Image: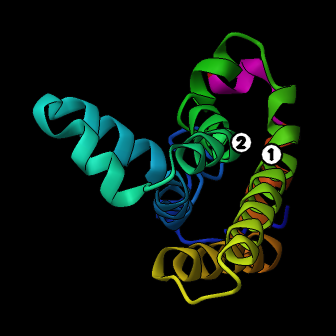
Amino acid sequence: MNGRLLLPLHCYDEAGVVKPPKWLYWLLLLACADWIVLIFALALREHTTLLLALFYPNRQLLIIQLIVTIPFILTLLLLGNRARLWKKGLVKWSKVILPLMLAGIALSLISTVWQLNHRDWEFALLQAFRLTLNLLLVILLLRSLHIGLMLSDWQYISPDSVK
């Protein structure tokens, strides 16, 4: 490195390691909205059935969406616990971040296209939102300087440098 920071200072943690961008967390949370709806519906016990029926008229759709978003959940868990994992000497997990996110996007796109095909391609706001979110995610993942620098920086993490 030539001594210049490639990203603004707020993009680095105390150890000088590139942090994930905040927008990535928000987009992953939006991609996991099915889990948030489920948790919210379960928290309101007397309205659980009504809330789930409102968002997921077909129970099978909810189960499919929960399964499809597992790669996003795993990514969020890994990103959120990165320092702990590094301190325990686990450093190779960072190599699965991009494949996990791309797998989540692919599964979500397949699920959305299946749902649209099942509805004879009738416009549905939720599916349009999912398509837009997934396309945005894939474009940002593949074109973001911040993500590229973060992933390349994480390849050189040693447990000693994080302690």
Q: Secondary structure at mark 1?
A: helix
Say above or below: 75 vs 130: above
Horizontal and vertical percent position of residue 68: 69, 47
**Residue most extreme to the top:** 88
Residue 160 drawn in magenta? yes
Q: Which residues are magenta?
A: 157-162
Would you name the residue on which mark 1 appears? 100
Q: Quadrant of residue 136?
A: bottom right
The label on residue 9 is none
Q: Is residue 3 visible?
A: no
Q: Main secondary structure of the magenta part?
A: helix
Query: Could you say where residue 63 lies in the image, as x and y percent from the top left?
Result: 59, 39
Within 10 Å of disc 2 (Cα), the crowding (few <14, some 14-19, many 20+) is many
Badge 2 is on which residue? Answer: 71
Q: Could you tell me residue 12's position as x and y percent? A: 56, 53
Neighbours of disc 1 within 10 Å: few (<14), some (14-19), many (20+): some
Mark positioned earlier in the residue sequence (1 or 2): 2
Mark count: 2
Q: Image height check: is 68 above or below 48?
A: below
What residue type is disc 2 on? Pro
In what element is the residue under mark 2? helix
Please indicate whether residue 55 sits to the left or right of residue 85 in the image: left
Cβ–Cβ under 8 Å for marks 1 and 2: yes
What residue lies at 37% left-to-right and 40% top-to-bottom? Answer: 38
Residue 147 appears in the picture as rendered: yes
Q: Nearer the viewer, residue 63 or 109?
A: 63
| Residue drawn 61% across the image and 82% down it | 132
Residue at x 59% of width, y 72% of height: 130
Q: Quadrant of the N terminus?
A: bottom right
Establish if 101 lies above or below 127: above
The amino acid pointed to by label 1 is Leu
